Amino acid sequence: SPVTMKYMELFIVADHTLYRNQNLNLGRTKQRIVEIANYVDKFYRLLNIKVALIGLEVWTERDQCAVSSDANATLWAFLQWRKSLRARKKHDNAQLLTGKTFGGTTIGMAPLEGMCSADNSGGVSVDHAEQPIGAAATMAHEIGHNFGLVHDSQGCCREATPEQGGCVMAAATGHPFPRVFSSCSRRQLESYFQKGGGMCLFNLPDTKDLVVARKCGNGFREEGEDCDCGEEEECTNPCCNAHNCTLKEGAQCAHGDCCHSCKLKAAGTMCREAAGSCDLPEFCTGSSPYCPANVYLLDGSECAHGHAYCSTGMCMTHQQQCVQLWGPGAWPAPDACFQDVNMAGNTYGNCGKDSQGRYVKCDKRDAMCGKIQCQSSAKKPQGTNTVSIDTTIRFKGREVKCRGTFVYSAKDDQEDLSDPGLVLTGTKCGDGMVCKDRRCQNVSLFELEKCVSRCHGHGVCNSNKNCHCDPGWAPPFCDKPGLGGSVDSGPVQKHESVLIALVVVSLFLLPALMLSIYYWYQQENSLLSRWLKETRHRSHGACRCVGHPKPALPSSHRALGLWGSSNPLCPAPTGVWGCGAPQTCSAPLPLGSGAVGLPKPALPSSHWGLGLHRPSLAGVWGTPNPPCPAPTGVWG
């Protein structure tokens, strides 16, 4: 949620026209970009988002992508160029600042909900005012679209009057320039984060990459600083000395989600909950005040019960987008609607626009990636400048209403937002297929399957292609007992939790085990007593003795208590130990001789220790009474 501070690593590019407008002065051009970035940062800090300018590029020789008066064509050309930028410089979002003028009154354009994505996290803005705050307001507006913010409808902006500049997400800007976001924008941003948007905004930027001058008071903790809570007049941090960026006496930390009351939280304390089904939680390490960098399920992981795939931490579905456009209760129309409408290639059904601004017909296989087609009982879609486009088709012998949307403005070419009625990038369009660049393309599951195979069935794969282990299993491969989590997330369980679990086991399981043993003991004793009574009754008076010497036994066998007296051995009759009257044998019979009765069965020596020596028999063998002679018919 926006309550936790987030960090957007911004890269700004100035085109060749802007450089010329600054009299080919590189230093002056860079200074202007830094001032614009500072304003953007100031606007977004009100939403608990710090904008860190980590890269700046000026095209001093020529433009590196096609920049024209067509805002749409310029946007998509820049986003294509950005792919090469990502390969050489890590960043969350890139914005092109141009000195050219777009057609009509458009001064910027950006894709909706493009933040953090490899393809759509960026926008274009015109440097249209003398003061840098003008371009900053436009850039903040376009970044807002990347965050999923749409234009403010009537009654949204109560935070500032038109005379004060209004709100940043107003459809049109005037003078003075806006500086604040409306309550509607705040709610939309909250919703965007709750469903898993903005996954790249949780890691701290490397302060070595910051373009701004390093100093105590800029809000970023840099080398040599314990903390940095901003300028003295704005600092409210009780753990940090604002004048010299040092920790106050007794403080262990001053910033971060793993710092509470100036002390580090224990390892295993959750510091960031999972935002949606495609996100993963993070936990404090116990040694850092900062929550580990955000990670989420690897793209291509299934979500929505197998009906969708995760894309940059969000579960993208047609259902979700229909609800966003039409409100609760909306659902996607049948596939036939997508095909009939989007293969027309007009304003109402298409797969976007080409570089010349012309609508593109969808191929049949790409139809699910064109204009979203929904079914809803609502009278009109949400948004003041959005109208419904209803098409009726015959499907399975009945008429079906396919409901699309069209966003209009005073002039068709004024709209600064790529069509929100188009299916979002990353939405599932078939088995193993997702929408990308308005086409239904294969999603590469090779890396996912390769990663999952290393997790031994006890974890999932995160966006860094590392195993996130279930509680009880240790990273990196979830094949050994441990605390869970990943090498990226911190331990899922606290060490204290494991200790507590062991204590609980000791307190409850061990007594239960002892009770079980005692119960078994009682049962065995009861059975033995009953058995003795029965056999004594059957064999009463059947004692006689044949005199033979007692066989010698190893000392280990004597220890069993089978012969525990110095008297000569007289084996008992079958099942009987002890007769009524004591008798003494004059000539004991050795084992194996011709005794009257059945021969004694041989027992392996190993059987002597496997349960013959039971506590319940104590005092039965080895009593001081002389043994009884064996009756006829029993061994001995």
Image (spheres, rainbow, N blue to C red):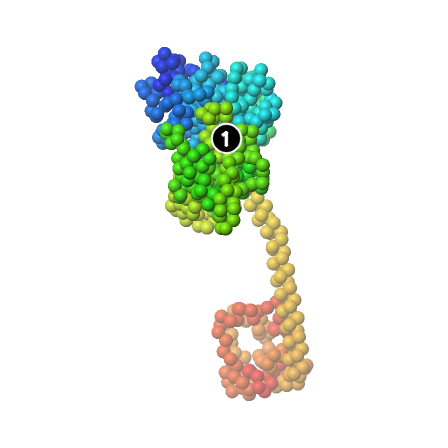
In-front residue for pair 339/601 = 339
In-front residue for pair 203/312 = 312
Residue that carries the numbered disc 1 in the rendered image: 407
In-front residue for pair 9/508 = 9
Q: Amino acid at mark 1?
A: Val
Q: Residue at point 62% right, 61% down?
A: 516
The answer to whether residue 405 shows anywhere in this view is: yes
Q: Quadrant of the C terminus?
A: bottom right
Q: Is residue 579 above or below residue 432?
A: below
161 with respect to 61 (left or right):
right
Occupied quadrant, residue 527 = bottom right
Q: Position of residue 301 (x, y in %)?
A: 45, 44
Q: Residue at point 58% right, 28% down?
A: 184
Q: Is residue 496 above or below residue 242?
A: below
Q: Is residue 525 above or below residue 39?
A: below
Q: Residue furthest top?
A: 23
Q: Is residue 132 above or below residue 76?
A: above
Q: Residue at point 60% right, 22% down?
A: 159
Q: Position of residue 94 (x, y in %)?
A: 42, 27
Q: Secondary structure at mark 1?
A: strand
The answer to whether residue 10 shows anywhere in this view is: no
Q: Residue at point 47% right, 24% down?
A: 411
In-front residue for pair 76/407 = 407
Q: Quadrant of the N terminus?
A: top right
Q: Position of residue 242 (x, y in %)?
A: 55, 19
| Label total for image | 1
473 with respect to 63 (left or right):
right
